[in-house]
Image (cartoon, grey):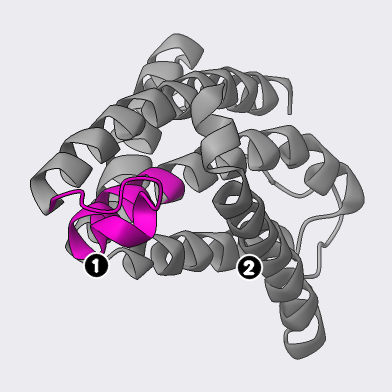
Amino acid sequence: MSIVLRRGKLLAVFNLLYFSSIFVAALVAGFLFAPPLYMGGSPEIFGAFPFGDPVIAFFVIFPSNLVLSAFVVVTLPGLGFFALSAVTMAVRSVLWGLLIYPLPVWGFLATLPTLILEGEAYVFAAVAGTTLGASWFRPRWMYREEAGISRVDALKRAFGEFKRMYFFVVVLLFVAAIVETLTIAYF
């Protein structure tokens, strides 16, 4: 929990950026694009399971969200330049907004738990990437209490924070994959 308290302001700003981007993207899309029309019957909102089995679906959803979405897309760009983690996280949130705008209310409510859990995981992943990237870019900016910290020491310390942050990412994405699998199975 100390890592959450240490990076609390950054987590708050990234949460605001992520969830407000979803809302703004869905709102703008609602004004710019006509909602899809459904002719008779109920619309197909949630697709079939990958390979037809919910257990296999979970084992496809969880690793792909963890490795591709959280690490490769959100965290890794921040290592090159710390601001890129926030940018890629915001792009993901805009894509979520575009995905949820045409949903009927029941479809939106069904996806809301997954949206919140995955969103929070991506926020932690972006903070981890930003911390890693900023530690070698501006070590004194990240660790103000240590005036003469070197880039190597700051990167080592940031990597320790990264491991603790990714614990939250793994737990949140694990729960989100369970919720997403159950949502697809139910609907």
Amino acid type at image mark 1:
Phe
**Comparing marks 1 and 2, which lies closer to the viewer?**
1
Q: Position of residue 128 (x, y in %)?
A: 37, 43
Determine the main secondary structure of the stretch shown in magenta.
helix
| Residue bearing the label numbered 2 | 98
Q: Quadrant of residue 103?
A: bottom right
Q: Is any part of residue 47 visible from this angle?
A: no
Looking at this rendering, what residue extends furthest in the left direction?
152
Label 2 residue SS: helix
Residue 63 falls left or right of residue 179 = left
Q: Name the one closer to the observer, 56 or 83.
A: 83
Which residue is found at the position 49% from the left and 30% from the top? 3
Do residues under tags 1 and 2 come within 8 Å of each other at their CB atoms?
no
Q: Name the one closer to the observer, 93 or 187.
A: 93
Tell me the tag on residue 27. Answer: none
Looking at this rendering, what residue extends furthest in the bottom direction?
32
Residue 124 falls left or right of residue 120 = left
Q: Position of residue 65 (x, y in %)?
A: 39, 36
Q: Residues within 10 Å of mark 2 (few under 14, many from 20)?
A: many
Q: Quadrant of residue 159?
A: top left
The quarter of the rendered structure image containing the N terminus is top right
| Residue bearing the label numbered 1 | 81
The quarter of the rendered structure image containing the C terminus is top right
Q: In the displayed structure, would residue 12 be above or below residue 34?
A: above
Decide whether residue 36 is among the magenta residues: no
Range drawn in magenta: 127-150
